[in-house]
Image (cartoon, grey):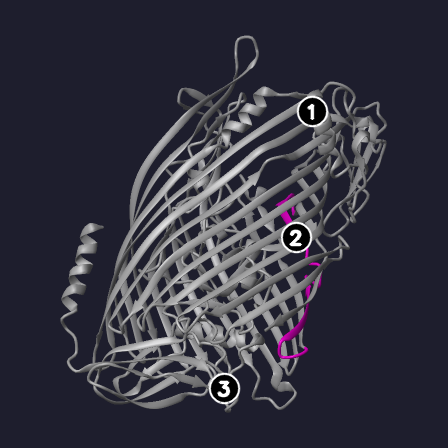
Amino acid sequence: MNRSLQLVAGLLATASFATIAHAGEVAGHVNDSTGTRALQSATVRIVELNRQVETDRAGSYVFGDVPAGTYTLEARYVGAEVTTKSVTVPATGRIDGSFDLPAIGGGDILVTGMTANMTSALSRQKAADGVESVLTRDAVGQFPDQNVAESLRRLPGVNILNDQGEGRFVAVRGLDPNLNSTSLNGVRVPAPESDVRQVALDVISADTIESIEVKKSFTPDMDGDFVGASIEINTTSAFDSKKNRYNVSAEGSWNDYSGKVTPKGSFDFTQKLGEDFGVAGSVSYYKRKFETDNVEMSDWTENDNGAVYGETLEYRDYDVERTRINAALSFDWRVSDTTKAYVRGNWSQFDDHEYRRRTTFDFGDFGDTATASGSTVSFDTGALEDGDKLTVERDLKDRFERQRIRTVTLGSDTDTGTWKFNWQASYAKSTEKETFSLDPMAFAADFENDSGASVTVDSGNKYFPTYSATGIDNASDYKFDKLELTTLSDSQDEEWAAKADLARTFAGENGDFTIQGGAKARWRTKSYNFNYSKFDGYDGDFTLADVLGSQTYRLLNMGPVANKSGSADFYLANSGNFELNDEDSLLDSSTSDYKVKEDVTAAYLLGRWDSSTLRVIGGVRMERTHNEMNGNLVVSSENDDGDTVIDVSPVTYKRNYTNWLPSLTVRYSPQQNLVARFAGYKTVVRPNLGDMAPSYTINEDGEAEFGNPALKPYQSWNFDAGFEYYFAKNGALTFGAFYKSIKDYIYSQTSTASGTFNGVEYTELQQSVNGDKADVAGIELGYSQAFTMLPAPFDGLLTQINYTYTYARGSVFYENDEGDQIARRINLPKSSKNTFNVVLGYEKGPISLRAAGTFRDKYLDEVGDSVDQDRIVNQHFQLDLSAKYKVTENIRLFADWVNVNNAKYYAYQNYAGAKRLLQYEEYGSTVKFGARVSF
């Protein structure tokens, strides 16, 4: 890397002598005609020199090395009139070339509402170096949706994976969310969860966000750690708006399942403190209470009588309370005409308190005694052999989990027109913590052949089975079975980073050539500490009747359930009577603990050609990775006396590897409303730190679960091509195609081949391993249009439509009955073949209406040991409605109806010739309503 830096410095130092004689500078700002908002990504061109630049987020631009003379400046922005002005450039010094752009037709550019969001997003997309999609807020701080994940749902090629009915994780082009990277103000955001790299984007409130850029192609000045996309989130800056702004909003949220109204409030502002210094900030609070009805089945089997059933059937009743608190603060300083400095901080907290009541049927002992008739399967305990039983378990989960994400970054950007120098230093930390969770407290009853109990399961319903039963609903029959108490679950992920970039631009007769180089270092530490106590006995009488509660389940009557808070209260009042299982507690407390260091050192060099029609960026990035991984080897065995013995031994691994990441990006615009793009590049995604952690567990049955410190990173060669046509009015038609060849992708494999590790034998092994090669290809289509050309009142209509097709296939290996490794082709996990988004809107005068529909195809969620064991998530369509009304220039009322159609979650496996339920959930819809005041 040192040689690379010396080469970059030498080239730039040599280049500094090749300046143009008698040259000046042209600089300025581009704003809307009302002076309300700086217009980012407006294009400014010196017509006679064929030189072109785009404005930054403050609306600023600069041309350096402009020969003395008189020139025509031209400014363009989607939805605005093309504006020109004549300037005379002196032999030395800087002249002002600022613009205030009117809308097409001579009015004001819309800077509020859906049309403003679309205009800003299209302008940035058009000006971008590579392939990207953009979401932005408007001039009064309104964002299209309530959190980052829900907003991203509207973009081409983006699919949102839900948790409890809320959008949380982002899949791009049908790829696993782990294959994306996420940045906040240029800072890579660590993952709060213990075992993944992906970041749940619903933690970050939309009230703090200025824009989200989903960059789907790579240039050498970017971190190369993504295959799907680099998701770059930017918070507000004091220089985004030309005027000071204060916004306050108050909102209520009502879920039709819980029937409760919960609050949300936010405050955000930008304030200039003189011409060259400003501060921007925001704070938001959102509490949501909702309920989920869930059914799950597993261990599907078919007996000799032709009865097909899941040996385990669960009915789950969730009551959830989620609280989100976000704060952001940004200081911006215009140090000089050429340099801006900044400090930005963000803090997010996500509290998730989940109660789950569950009724579980274990039909594992029935075998051929289970009988089928039409859509029903009957389980009569009278047909069981002696010693066999029907086990019914009723349990409660009471878990409180807190996630926090905090980032701080400071740096400066200098642009003289010929030289650019940027530097940034940052700190980020994410945590997820539990300190007291019942997970779960369980009560069980065994019904043998003399009990008279029976259960009939009816699968006639399209999505989930119902049941009828006799002799199983007496709460006093359910004795205390176990309590699994999480006393500490502490995941911490921390990263320090520093980077610098230096560029020199040479002005030519038909464009500019730039040499740019830079370096970056990242120091990351991720750890997980888990402490667990298992109690499997109680000194005294303790049954479900002692903590009996009431259910809120709507699908059917699931029988007696535990009180939501009563179980924890009972434990705290009687903790001395619970009998601890020392061996299981130590085993589970030791297996998950790990600490991994990951240091990445990077350097790059690129060349860039810019003219009004052609932009070419080519170069290479080097990233060297150093890992230090610490975990435990945990062995459970029996001694000569038949007692269980747990042995815990620390394990440490170290490794280094280097990736070279070349790229070439071409942007060709033969006329101002046409853009063609091509990109070819290589990127990598490092394995999940939890998968690499050297954690090794072998139980007394010889079943082993190993981490894999030798996991290789995903390596992907990527190719993108696209075509964009921008209408004279506000709109665009886009087409894109992509192909990815992914080597060493990662999946979980179970092997029944016996082996030995550190002298300990095992008979079965589950471990994450590298696959061979996967191919991903697809197309993206997009259409956006504000129909301002139509006669009133139809001139307020607008639409945004996009469709993505993704082909994603790879090979995994499994063992047949003879122990041979057999390859089979699969769709890559989380890969949906078809995704489709439609937004229909109307915005005119004080009224703004929107209907948004989102569709994603089914996808493979988990790879099973065979095709009929694969877990598949069914297709999903969700409809959302929103309305806004401008009471005055400063007061707006709004209402949102989320999940109008009560879209369900349905996962299944294809077994015995039919779809067999694995998981079903429904959530109901949510209505939000409130007011926003700006001043």
Specify the amino acid type for callout 2. Answer: Tyr
Asked if the stretch drawn in magenta spans residue 313, the answer is no
Question: In which quadrant of the rendered image does the C terminus lie?
Answer: bottom right
Looking at marks 3 and 1 on the same chain, the residue that comes earlier in the sequence is marked by: 3
Q: Residue furthest front?
A: 274
Q: Nearer the viewer, mark 3 or mark 1?
A: 1
Real-space Cα distance between discs 3 and 1?
A: 71 Å
What's the magenta region?
A: 887-914
What mark, if any, has residue 103 been given in the picture? 3
549 horizontally vs 304: left or right: right
872 horizontally vs 33: left or right: right
Q: Position of residue 836 (x, y in %)?
A: 57, 66
Q: Does residue 49 lie above or below 705 as drawn?
A: below
Asked if the stretch drawn in magenta spans residue 910, the answer is yes
Judging depth in this view, the residue of 545 and 619 nearest the camera is 545
Quadrant housing residue 611: bottom left
Judging depth in this view, the residue of 572 and 114 nearest the camera is 572
Q: Does residue 223 lie above or below 686 as drawn?
A: below
Judging depth in this view, the residue of 574 and 290 nearest the camera is 574
Q: Identify the residue at horizontal 78%, vertical 46% (top origin).
A: 552
Q: Position of residue 219 (x, y in %)?
A: 33, 62
Residue identifier under label 1: 575
Real-space Cα distance between discs 2 and 1?
A: 38 Å
Residue identifier under label 2: 905
Q: Secondary structure at mark 3?
A: loop
